[in-house]
Amino acid sequence: MKITKMLTALLFIVAAGCNPKLEIEDDQDFDTTVTETDAQASDIHGGSPVPEDWDSCNAMPGNHPCNFSFEDQYGDTFELYDNYGKVIVLDFSTMWCSVCQNLAPDIQAYQDTYGPRGFLWVTVLVDNSSGEPPTADDIQDWSTMFGIETSPVLVGDRSIVDLTGTTGYPISSWPTMVVIDKEMVIYNGLHGWNETTILSWIEGLL
Protein backbone atom coordinates (compact mmCIF):
# COMPACT_ATOMS: atom_id res chain seq x y z
CA MET A 1 0.00 0.00 0.00
CA LYS A 2 2.82 2.43 0.86
CA ILE A 3 4.50 1.77 -2.48
CA THR A 4 1.23 2.36 -4.33
CA LYS A 5 0.74 5.71 -2.61
CA MET A 6 4.28 6.79 -3.39
CA LEU A 7 3.98 5.90 -7.06
CA THR A 8 0.63 7.66 -7.31
CA ALA A 9 2.01 10.84 -5.76
CA LEU A 10 4.91 10.86 -8.23
CA LEU A 11 2.51 11.28 -11.14
CA PHE A 12 2.23 14.92 -10.16
CA ILE A 13 5.11 17.37 -10.62
CA VAL A 14 6.49 18.85 -7.41
CA ALA A 15 7.17 22.58 -7.12
CA ALA A 16 7.35 25.14 -4.31
CA GLY A 17 4.46 24.61 -1.92
CA CYS A 18 3.32 24.20 1.69
CA ASN A 19 2.62 21.21 3.84
CA PRO A 20 1.75 21.13 7.54
CA LYS A 21 5.37 20.74 8.66
CA LEU A 22 7.69 22.34 6.13
CA GLU A 23 8.16 24.62 3.16
CA ILE A 24 9.34 22.82 0.01
CA GLU A 25 12.03 24.94 -1.63
CA ASP A 26 13.32 22.83 -4.55
CA ASP A 27 11.59 22.24 -7.87
CA GLN A 28 11.56 18.57 -8.84
CA ASP A 29 10.54 17.65 -12.38
CA PHE A 30 9.85 14.31 -14.01
CA ASP A 31 8.31 12.92 -17.20
CA THR A 32 4.98 14.69 -17.78
CA THR A 33 3.78 12.47 -20.63
CA VAL A 34 0.09 11.67 -20.31
CA THR A 35 -0.78 8.04 -21.06
CA GLU A 36 -4.18 7.54 -22.67
CA THR A 37 -6.23 4.40 -22.92
CA ASP A 38 -7.93 3.77 -26.25
CA ALA A 39 -11.22 5.02 -24.84
CA GLN A 40 -9.65 8.19 -23.47
CA ALA A 41 -7.86 8.83 -26.74
CA SER A 42 -11.21 8.58 -28.50
CA ASP A 43 -12.61 11.22 -26.17
CA ILE A 44 -9.72 13.60 -26.84
CA HIS A 45 -9.29 13.06 -30.56
CA GLY A 46 -12.80 12.90 -31.95
CA GLY A 47 -15.50 11.50 -29.68
CA SER A 48 -17.31 13.81 -27.28
CA PRO A 49 -19.20 11.70 -24.74
CA VAL A 50 -21.06 13.60 -22.06
CA PRO A 51 -19.95 13.04 -18.45
CA GLU A 52 -22.89 10.82 -17.52
CA ASP A 53 -21.76 8.31 -20.17
CA TRP A 54 -18.33 7.77 -18.61
CA ASP A 55 -17.81 4.33 -17.12
CA SER A 56 -15.07 5.29 -14.67
CA CYS A 57 -13.30 8.25 -13.12
CA ASN A 58 -10.31 8.98 -10.92
CA ALA A 59 -7.90 11.80 -10.16
CA MET A 60 -4.90 10.73 -12.20
CA PRO A 61 -3.58 12.22 -15.48
CA GLY A 62 -5.16 10.73 -18.60
CA ASN A 63 -8.47 9.96 -16.88
CA HIS A 64 -11.80 11.68 -16.39
CA PRO A 65 -12.00 13.25 -12.91
CA CYS A 66 -14.93 12.32 -10.73
CA ASN A 67 -17.62 14.94 -10.30
CA PHE A 68 -17.80 16.93 -7.08
CA SER A 69 -19.93 19.75 -5.73
CA PHE A 70 -19.17 22.42 -3.15
CA GLU A 71 -20.69 25.78 -2.25
CA ASP A 72 -19.01 28.84 -3.80
CA GLN A 73 -18.41 32.34 -2.42
CA TYR A 74 -21.91 33.43 -3.49
CA GLY A 75 -23.69 30.54 -1.78
CA ASP A 76 -24.35 28.73 -5.06
CA THR A 77 -23.57 25.05 -5.69
CA PHE A 78 -20.63 24.48 -8.01
CA GLU A 79 -20.45 21.15 -9.85
CA LEU A 80 -17.33 20.22 -11.78
CA TYR A 81 -19.21 18.47 -14.61
CA ASP A 82 -21.31 21.59 -15.27
CA ASN A 83 -18.13 23.05 -16.80
CA TYR A 84 -17.50 20.33 -19.38
CA GLY A 85 -15.99 21.93 -22.48
CA LYS A 86 -13.72 24.36 -20.62
CA VAL A 87 -10.06 24.17 -19.72
CA ILE A 88 -10.09 24.09 -15.92
CA VAL A 89 -7.48 24.62 -13.23
CA LEU A 90 -8.40 23.09 -9.88
CA ASP A 91 -6.42 24.91 -7.22
CA PHE A 92 -6.55 22.97 -3.94
CA SER A 93 -5.38 25.44 -1.29
CA THR A 94 -5.57 26.20 2.41
CA MET A 95 -5.99 29.56 4.07
CA TRP A 96 -2.94 29.03 6.30
CA CYS A 97 -0.55 28.28 3.44
CA SER A 98 1.81 31.16 2.61
CA VAL A 99 2.29 30.04 -1.00
CA CYS A 100 -1.50 29.92 -1.43
CA GLN A 101 -1.78 33.42 0.01
CA ASN A 102 0.88 34.71 -2.39
CA LEU A 103 -0.87 33.10 -5.37
CA ALA A 104 -4.42 34.24 -4.55
CA PRO A 105 -4.04 37.93 -5.58
CA ASP A 106 -3.25 36.85 -9.17
CA ILE A 107 -6.16 34.45 -9.67
CA GLN A 108 -8.69 37.01 -10.89
CA ALA A 109 -6.15 38.28 -13.41
CA TYR A 110 -5.67 34.76 -14.77
CA GLN A 111 -9.43 34.36 -15.04
CA ASP A 112 -9.78 37.72 -16.80
CA THR A 113 -7.01 36.85 -19.25
CA TYR A 114 -8.04 33.32 -20.18
CA GLY A 115 -11.74 33.23 -19.30
CA PRO A 116 -12.98 34.60 -22.66
CA ARG A 117 -11.19 31.68 -24.37
CA GLY A 118 -13.11 29.02 -22.45
CA PHE A 119 -11.13 28.79 -19.22
CA LEU A 120 -12.07 28.53 -15.55
CA TRP A 121 -9.86 28.77 -12.46
CA VAL A 122 -11.47 27.02 -9.47
CA THR A 123 -10.07 27.44 -5.96
CA VAL A 124 -11.06 24.71 -3.50
CA LEU A 125 -10.17 25.84 0.03
CA VAL A 126 -9.69 22.72 2.15
CA ASP A 127 -8.66 24.26 5.50
CA ASN A 128 -9.23 27.65 7.08
CA SER A 129 -6.47 29.56 8.85
CA SER A 130 -6.88 27.35 11.94
CA GLY A 131 -6.62 24.10 10.00
CA GLU A 132 -10.34 23.43 10.35
CA PRO A 133 -12.86 22.95 7.52
CA PRO A 134 -13.66 26.41 6.11
CA THR A 135 -17.04 28.02 6.54
CA ALA A 136 -19.03 30.08 4.04
CA ASP A 137 -17.82 33.21 5.86
CA ASP A 138 -14.19 32.07 5.48
CA ILE A 139 -14.67 31.67 1.74
CA GLN A 140 -16.29 35.07 1.38
CA ASP A 141 -13.50 36.70 3.40
CA TRP A 142 -10.84 35.04 1.21
CA SER A 143 -12.59 36.10 -2.01
CA THR A 144 -13.00 39.68 -0.80
CA MET A 145 -9.44 39.96 0.52
CA PHE A 146 -7.92 38.86 -2.78
CA GLY A 147 -10.46 40.41 -5.16
CA ILE A 148 -11.71 37.10 -6.61
CA GLU A 149 -15.08 37.77 -8.23
CA THR A 150 -15.65 35.66 -11.36
CA SER A 151 -13.42 32.71 -10.42
CA PRO A 152 -15.20 30.23 -8.12
CA VAL A 153 -13.86 29.86 -4.59
CA LEU A 154 -15.32 26.76 -2.95
CA VAL A 155 -15.99 25.61 0.60
CA GLY A 156 -14.01 22.37 0.41
CA ASP A 157 -12.92 19.82 2.99
CA ARG A 158 -10.50 16.91 3.26
CA SER A 159 -12.96 14.46 1.70
CA ILE A 160 -11.45 15.62 -1.60
CA VAL A 161 -8.03 14.18 -0.61
CA ASP A 162 -7.00 10.59 -1.44
CA LEU A 163 -3.30 9.81 -1.95
CA THR A 164 -4.18 6.85 -4.17
CA GLY A 165 -6.09 9.13 -6.56
CA THR A 166 -9.07 6.76 -6.54
CA THR A 167 -11.77 8.59 -4.62
CA GLY A 168 -10.08 11.98 -4.34
CA TYR A 169 -6.98 13.91 -5.39
CA PRO A 170 -3.42 12.90 -4.41
CA ILE A 171 -2.73 16.12 -2.51
CA SER A 172 0.52 16.00 -0.55
CA SER A 173 1.33 19.74 -0.40
CA TRP A 174 -0.44 23.05 -0.74
CA PRO A 175 -1.40 24.25 -3.19
CA THR A 176 -1.92 21.27 -5.47
CA MET A 177 -2.90 22.23 -9.02
CA VAL A 178 -4.82 19.97 -11.41
CA VAL A 179 -5.27 21.00 -15.05
CA ILE A 180 -8.25 19.52 -16.95
CA ASP A 181 -8.72 19.77 -20.72
CA LYS A 182 -11.87 20.56 -22.71
CA GLU A 183 -12.86 16.89 -22.89
CA MET A 184 -12.83 16.78 -19.06
CA VAL A 185 -9.66 14.68 -18.99
CA ILE A 186 -6.94 15.41 -16.44
CA TYR A 187 -3.94 16.70 -18.38
CA ASN A 188 -1.45 16.99 -15.53
CA GLY A 189 -0.93 18.07 -11.95
CA LEU A 190 1.51 20.09 -9.87
CA HIS A 191 2.30 19.82 -6.16
CA GLY A 192 3.06 23.41 -5.19
CA TRP A 193 3.11 26.42 -7.50
CA ASN A 194 5.06 27.29 -10.63
CA GLU A 195 3.47 30.03 -12.76
CA THR A 196 5.46 29.26 -15.91
CA THR A 197 4.46 25.60 -15.86
CA ILE A 198 0.76 26.17 -15.19
CA LEU A 199 0.35 28.98 -17.73
CA SER A 200 2.16 26.95 -20.40
CA TRP A 201 -0.25 24.05 -19.80
CA ILE A 202 -3.24 26.40 -20.03
CA GLU A 203 -1.97 28.01 -23.25
CA GLY A 204 -1.35 24.62 -24.79
CA LEU A 205 -4.88 23.40 -24.11
CA LEU A 206 -6.87 26.51 -25.13
Image (cartoon, rainbow, N blue to C red):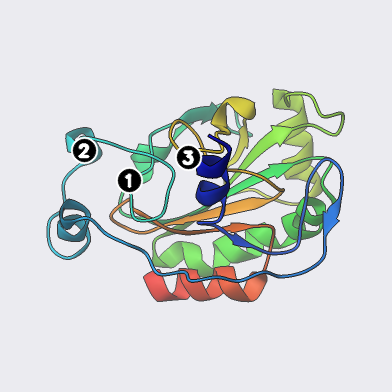
Give the numbered dot on residue 64. Answer: 1
Three-letter amino acid code at disc 1?
Answer: His
Question: Left or right: 10 with respect to 173?
Answer: left
Query: Which numbered disc covers residue 26?
Result: none
SS at badge 3 = loop
For marks 3 and 2, give the CA distance. 17 Å
| Residue 192 spot, x, y in % from top left | 69, 58
User: Is the C-beta separation of discs 1 and 2 under 8 Å?
Assistant: yes
Residue mark closest to the camera, 3 vs 1:
3
- Mark 2 belongs to which amino acid? Trp
Residue at the image point whose x is 71% and y is 70% from the top: 27
Query: Which residue, given by chain and number where applicable, does mark 3 sit on?
Result: 165
Q: Quadrant of residue 183?
A: bottom left
Residue 75 against residue 168 in the figure, above or below: above
* Rendered image quadrant of residue 94: top right
Q: Which mark is residue 54?
A: 2
Callout 2 environment at 10 Å: few (<14), some (14 to 19), or many (20+)? few
Number of numbered markers: 3
User: In what element is the residue under mark 1?
Assistant: loop
Disc 3 marks a residue whose amino acid type is Gly
Q: Are marks 3 and 1 in contact (CB under 8 Å)?
A: no
Label 3, label 1: how many angstroms apart (C-alpha)?
12 Å
User: In the picture provided, is 146 more to the left or to the right than 122?
Assistant: right
Q: Give percent across and percent down for residue 17.
A: 75, 56
- Between 148 and 202, the one nearer to me in the picture: 202
Quadrant containing the C terminus in the rendered view? bottom left
Residue at x-position 86% and y-position 43%: 21
Residue found at x 54% / y 57%: 12
Rounded to the nearest whole Å, what is the CA distance between mark 1 and mark 2?
8 Å
Which numbered disc, 3 or 1, marks the residue that appears first in the sequence?
Answer: 1
Q: Indicate which disc, 3 or 2, sits on the residue closer to the N terminus.
A: 2
